[in-house]
Image (tube, rainbow, N blue to C red):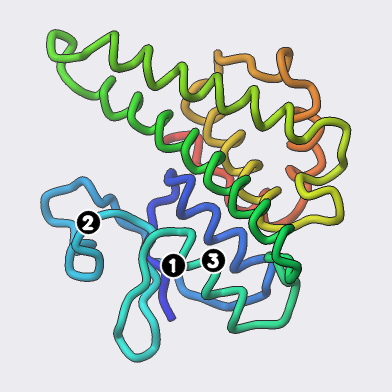
Amino acid sequence: MKLIASLTSPFARKVRIVLHEKKIDCPLEEVQPWLPDSHVIDHNPLGKVPVLILDDGSSLFDSRVIVEYLDTISPVSRIFPQEKRALIATRRWEALADGICDAAAAIVVERRRATEQQSEEWVRRQMQKVERGLTVLAHDLGERHWCNGEGYGLADIAVGVCLGYLDFRFPALNWRERHPNLAALQQRLAPRPSFADTVPPPSV
């Protein structure tokens, strides 16, 4: 297998954390998918990362598909719960965390446009999604130690990656004061080797 990814992509980071947690050795090919000479489209027609190239040359894309596949090929550190209700809850956590990342990334892309082409209304709408999403994450977490209440798993990984991406791209957002329980969750996650080893490079 080989993972094609950008070190700044929160979705790629989610996959890298899962690989680490499940002790799956997988080479990483770092790419910048937005560059004209990127070959990502050879493996994903949408031109997005991450992409997992399998041993037979076929590819998997979208981080949700990839992490589910990874959980099936190794019994080490199961990240998806087996009970149906808990599984649905995990997918909901992941969908919300990924959606916040989508909105945040949309702002980043908009800010790269020429100033006269940027839409402040668009940026405001995306930031409202981020703020609403954080409020729901904090409400659903409540006083629990882990997102699903029973143990560490994909829900925590997705939320932790989301919070890390906001820190990376929006350091002035100051979400910790409004949501101290999310801050406490991030503090529990940060020392894990899987999180510590996948922090986006500060120079990017």
Q: How far is disc 2 from disc 1 in space, using C-alphas? A: 20 Å
Label 1 Cα crowd, 10 Å radius (few <14 / some 14-19 / many 20+): some
Relative side of 104 to 151, left or right: left
Query: Which amino acid type is shown beneath numbered disc 2?
Result: Leu
Q: Mark 2: give few (<14), some (14-19) or many (20+) Cα within 10 Å.
A: few
Tag 1's secondary structure?
strand
| Disc sitting over residue 97 in the figure | none
Residue displayed at 24% across by 24% down = 112
Q: Where in the figure is residue 107, as x and y percent of width and height? A: 35, 24
Q: Nearer the viewer, mark 3 or mark 1?
A: 3
Q: Decide which of tag 3 and tag 2 comes sooner along the chain.
A: 2
Say whether disc 3 or disc 1 marks the residue closer to the N-terminus: 1
Residue 28 in percent (x, y) is at 44, 67
Three-letter amino acid code of the residue under disc 3: Val
Q: Residue furthest bottom?
A: 56
- The residue under label 2 is 46
Under mark 1, the amino acid is Leu
Q: Residue shown at 71%/82% (left/top)?
A: 75
Label whose residue precedes the other's in the sequence (2 or 1): 1
Res 138 quadrant in image: top right
**Residue in view at x 55 percent, y 69 percent:** 68
Which quadrant is the N terminus positioned in?
bottom left
In terms of secondary structure, where does tag 3 sit?
A: helix
Which of the two residues, 29 or 150, is positioned nearer the viewer here?
Answer: 150
List the residue tagged with mark 3: 67
The residue pinned by badge 1 equals 28
Marks 3 and 1 sit apart, C-alpha to C-alpha, by: 15 Å
Query: Residue 117's quadrant in the figure?
Result: top left
Q: Are marks 2 and 1 in contact (CB under 8 Å)?
A: no
Q: CA distance from mark 3 to mark 2?
A: 18 Å
Horizontal placement of 167 versus 51: left or right? Answer: right
